[in-house]
Image: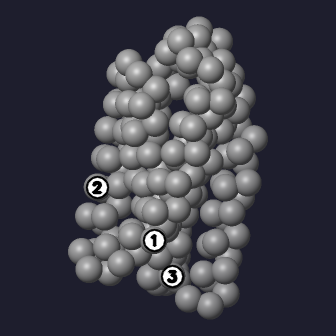
Amino acid sequence: MSEPARFTWLIPGLGLLACLGPFSNDLYVPSLSLVVDGLGTDAGSVQLTMTAVLVGFSVGALIHGPLAVRFGRKPVLCLGLAAYAVGGLLAALSQSLGALIAARAIQGVSAAAAIVLTRVIVLDRWTGTEASRVMSWISIFMFVAPVLAPLLGGYIAGFGYWPAVFWSQAA
């Protein structure tokens, strides 16, 4: 089996990892009004939970690359995914808006590990046109995620229980 073909099984897994960023916010959007009612706050304040993910994602994008060089791809990716699950659990258990914002920031920082390391792993395994081809396949996942996530999030929000979206993200 040729070197590029040996890693073909990685492509769907990397595609799913690359979707973690879009799923972090897009899955949550249909539940915003439920969070407003559940935490007894206003919509403007709840939108800070969306900002927290984006700020966390920006910070995470800066730190995960150097961490992966220092400690390796797999430990940083595993720690990022574990932190994402913990962030989801903390968000689901939040009793205040401040706690929810902090949990969403954790989700943002940790989701960045999946996106950053997806690209790094592709460049570790493939070169030249093969790397471009693999990134094209991964991009398909990334383009479909923002379409499917709100649909799935709307289904989850249909249960009327706002923490359900975070339980699903943690899972």
* Image depth: mark 1 or mark 2 in front: 1
SS of the residue under disc 2: helix
Of the numbered discs 3 and 1, the one sitting upstream in the chain is 1
What kind of element bears circle 1? helix
Find residue 12 and report its image quarter. Answer: bottom right
- Residue occupying the point 57% across, 38% down: 48
> What residue is disc 2 on?
79
CA neighbours of label 2 inside 10 A, class few (<14), some (14 to 19), many (20+): few
Amino acid type of the residue that numbered disc 3 sits on in the rendered structure? Leu
- CB of mark 2 within 8 Å of CB of mark 3? no
Residue visible at 58% across and 11% down in the picture: 37
Going by the image, does 16 lie left or right of 135?
A: left
Mark closer to the observer (3, 1): 1
Q: Please provide percent x and percent y for residue 47.
A: 62, 34
Q: How crowded is mark 3: few (under 14 residues within 10 Å), some or many (20 or more)?
A: some
Distance of mark 1 from mark 2, alpha carbons? 16 Å
Q: Nearer the viewer, residue 50 or 146?
A: 50
Count residues near mark 1 (Cα–Cα under 10 Å), then give few for <14, some for 14-19, many for 20+.
some
Q: Do the residues labelled 1 and 2 touch (CB within 8 Å)?
A: no
- Disc 1 target residue: 62
Secondary structure under tag 3 reads helix
Which residue does the image show at 59% across and 30% down from the upper left? Answer: 45
x then y, percent, for residue 88: 40, 34
Q: Which of 44 and 35 is in front in this view?
A: 44
Image mark for residue 123: 3
Q: Is residue 111 above or below residue 34?
A: below
